[in-house]
Image (tube, helix red, strand yellow):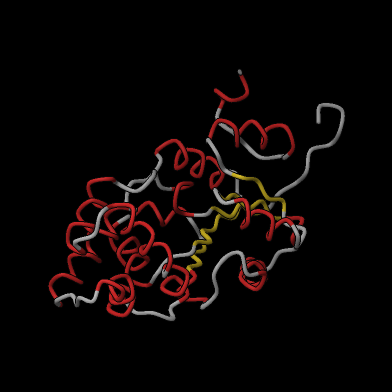
Amino acid sequence: MSNERKIQIRAVVFDYGNVISLSQLQPNIEGMAAICKLPMPRFQEHYWRFRPAYDRGDLTANSYWAAVLREEGRELTKEEVSKLVELDSESWGRPNPAVLQWVEQLRQAGIQLAVLSNMPLEISRYLEANRPWLALYQHLMFSCDLRLVKPDPAIYHACLKTLNMAPQEVLFLDDRMDNVQASANLGIHSFLFETLERTLALVEERFELPVPAMVKET
């Protein structure tokens, strides 16, 4: 957009998993599979099958993990569920330092910052209590609190209401195309987050937002 005026953005909304955070820790996934006594492919299938209901708050930790193992005909002890919640929470706890560096730059520039994530209650509370860098964001919007999950359009309306902004004033970043498309359908500027470098290059091209100097030089 070198010959056009760049778009003014007042808020940037980040998905959490695989955007702010790095990918799940494999030892944690293996640990959860071992507690469930499931081979990895079957564990992953069941883990994600019931995740939307858990993220939305329709299931508690106990009922979620019971659902994961329902077809196996076995029940978990209280201690096993507690350990699963611990491993699950820790598996999502690693931030991408380069993303946080950019977030700090955006904050210093006066841009409103928000997290909009599909996330169950236990993990969201764990992160809020143990990851102080989440304080960089003025708004933390988790599906378990909103009782909505992406890509339901209602969750994006709730986000805009919280921000008190029009769709065209907001940039949304997510690693899932269905979530990005649902957001874009409402007029929100929306990018698929594949790598930070690719995302920053697109942002630099289209929007009046600060990006790290290294991107401008490439």
> In the rendered view of the protein, which quadrant contains the N terminus?
top right
Q: Is residue 36 above or below residue 212?
A: below
Determine the residue located farthest toward the right in the rendered image. 3
Report the residue at 32% width, 55% height from top. 131
Q: Position of residue 82 (x, y in %)?
A: 19, 70
In the image, residue 104 above or below residue 125: above
Of 60 and 217, the residue lying toward us: 60
The location of residue 34, given as percent across then percent down, is: 18, 57
Which residue shows up at 18% across the image and 75% down it? 76
For the residue pair 144 and 72, the one nearer the viewer reads as 72
User: From the viewer's perspective, is residue 126 above or below residue 99?
Assistant: below
Residue 99 relative to residue 36: left or right: right
Q: Is residue 48 left or right of residue 90?
A: right
**Residue drawn 31% across and 59% down?**
43
Q: Quadrant of residue 54?
A: bottom left
**Is residue 113 shown left or right of residue 26?**
right
Looking at the rendered structure, the number of numbered marks drawn on it comes to 0
Residue 139 placement (x, y as % from top left): 52, 63
Q: Residue furthest top?
A: 217
Measuring from the top left, give residue 17's x and y in whole percent. 44, 52
Quadrant housing the C terminus: top right
